[in-house]
Amino acid sequence: MAVRSVRWTRFLLYAALVLLAAAYLLPLYMTIATSLKAPADIRLDTVWEFPRELSWESYAVAWERFAPQLRNSFILAVSATILSTVMGSMNGYVLSKWRFRGSEVIFPLILFGMFIPYQSTLIPLFQFLRSTGLYGGLPGLVLVHTVYGLPITTLIFRNFYAQVPNELLESASLDGAGFFGIYGRVMLPLSVPGFVVTVIWQFTQIWNEFLWAVTLTRPQAQPITVALANLAGGQAVQWNLPMAGSVLAAIPTVLIYIFLGRYFMRGLLAGSLKG
Amino acid sequence: MKSRQDRLIAIAMIAPSLVLLAVFVYGFIGQTLFVSMSDWGRGAALAVNPELSFVGLDNFRELFTGFLDVRFRQDLVNMLAFSVLFVGGCLLVGLLLATLLEQGVRGEGFFRTVFLFPMSLSFIVTGTIWRWMLQPRGGVNVLPTLVGLPRIEFAWLTSRDQVWQWNWQDVPVILGVLAALACVVMAGRWWLAGGRKRAVAAGALAAAALAWTFTAATEIEVLPFPEYHGFNLALAGVVVAAVWQMSGYTMALFLAGLRGIPDELREAARVDGCSWWQLYRYVELPLLKPIIWSAVIILGHIALKSFDLVFVMAGPDNAATSVPAVSMYLTAFRGNQFAKGAAIAVVLLALVSVLIVPYLVSTFRSRGAE
């Protein structure tokens, strides 16, 4: 009797999980199925049917249309990720191993910057970029993403470096290493996982960002999120194109997530100050 | 040990970041505050360097009580309703997923990946996909017909129906009652904890709040006419998409929390004859409480800031489903009413700060004590 009831609960458990997983995957199925249909085959009564003949045309059109914006997003995400990660690493090193008077107060003040609604700095930011001639182009956007990325990168590195035992630093220091010597010989070799977590987190965030992308760029510098929103937001859309565009826009971050999900999770937990 | 020169180098290395953040975060917030109390976009011309005059809290007064800014008030109501449903949905679904996965299932890694992958998407991608899923005569609505059930007839994103309607003129009374309730709760907690004096003081405050509510508050004229606001059903679709995207996050938090509970504790409870449900309800859930709180705060502040998803799913020009973050963008960057846009941004910042500042303070106070 007991064995049977255990079996039943196991069965129910797996049934529930499979159902839930199917529900989570439905939008993915729908996206791929729609993107592989010829525009004429997209009818509301057959939306859930997988196309009998695969049509790759949507992807060809979407690629041609979105290639410049994908390129913009790529340049933006790579540059701002590198800059904010390098600066965050230095900040984390100073805040964990070279504390100075007031550094404990400064740290939460830095972190506040990653929680604010960015609307609250948007108007002065817009004015600032216009007055410096950076408005509308990628360099301005790189600057913005770098600066507002500093709180999270600093946080991840500070928590990471705090685990490095001080004895290691002291012995390096006895060997005559100074500020940069310790960083290069002790911290840097140990911080590969820290860099992976930060780079993945920043790349994903910057690639996916929309508010600055839509307010601070001119059409030539538009990232992919803006182009996709413009396409999907229009009336009487042909849905195969937005779906193919969504797949193209999602591929880089989803690939990162699938192959490096463990590190993605660590960034996620760090962002809620629990990492 | 650490030389003076090295200490100076350390400060010099962090200085650029500190200066940038001081300007881009605190300086710009200050400037936004200033703009929100100016007439930029109203009296002031649309020049690059317009002459701004100080108008005090006029913009805020207009937002909350002005005839023309009814949209902002509907935005606030939408945002609060969205936040409650989104946070509640993520907590429930996340808890369910984490509890199921915690039972030692085969293929856990696969399931975890499936529930978490929406987290890696942009809200713009999620919004585009779900807008297609929620077409009135397709997607989710025809899903039941695949197994022979009738079609769902719900206009997910275009409905104009409102539920839970209330009058904006009642805001002072509602706030008064809420304040009184909060005081009563505090009083009760202190009473149980043995702080009698504090409890009595809180009780007295509750009575004062109630007295004020039913005398002075009813006299305040917020608006000269009744104005009804409610939860717009068209936002339901946005809530579904948002929960789909973010419930994996709560699942991950809860899973980490459940894994952190020492096995000895579970063993002890089992030895004492706890059933599975008792163990879950009286041992595991209480231990998850701090995680639930931080999830509420993180998700809550994301909900208050929500912009992308509403923008792409309901459209920026859809006043019925708008939220303050979207209106701020439209007011400032399409309507050129920078002062009013700044005022909306300040309201948003204030709401987010109410959640985040205590969270930051408590996090760092407890860390300092370690």
Image: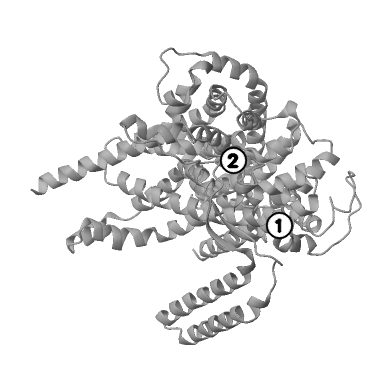
Residue at image x 64%, y 67%?
Answer: B169
Q: Is residue B140 above or below residue B32?
A: above
Residue A5 spot, x, y in % from top left: 14, 47
Q: Chain of mark 2?
A: B
**Going by the picture, which residue comes out furthest to the left?**
A1
Q: Residue at x 59, y 73 (%)?
A: B173
Disc 1 secondary structure class: helix
- The scheme the figure's colours follow is one colour
Regarding residue A65, the answer to whether it shows in the image is yes
Q: Dot 2, crowdedness within 10 Å: few (<14), some or many (≥20)?
A: many
Q: Secondary structure at mark 2?
A: loop
Residue B52 percent coordinates (x, y): 89, 55
Chain letter for mark 1: B
**Residue B346, which numbered label?**
1
Q: Earlier in the sequence, mark 1 or mark 2?
A: 2
Mark 1–mark 2 Cα distance, whole angstroms, equals: 24 Å
Pointer 2: what residue? B314
Question: Left or right: B273 with respect to B155?
Answer: left
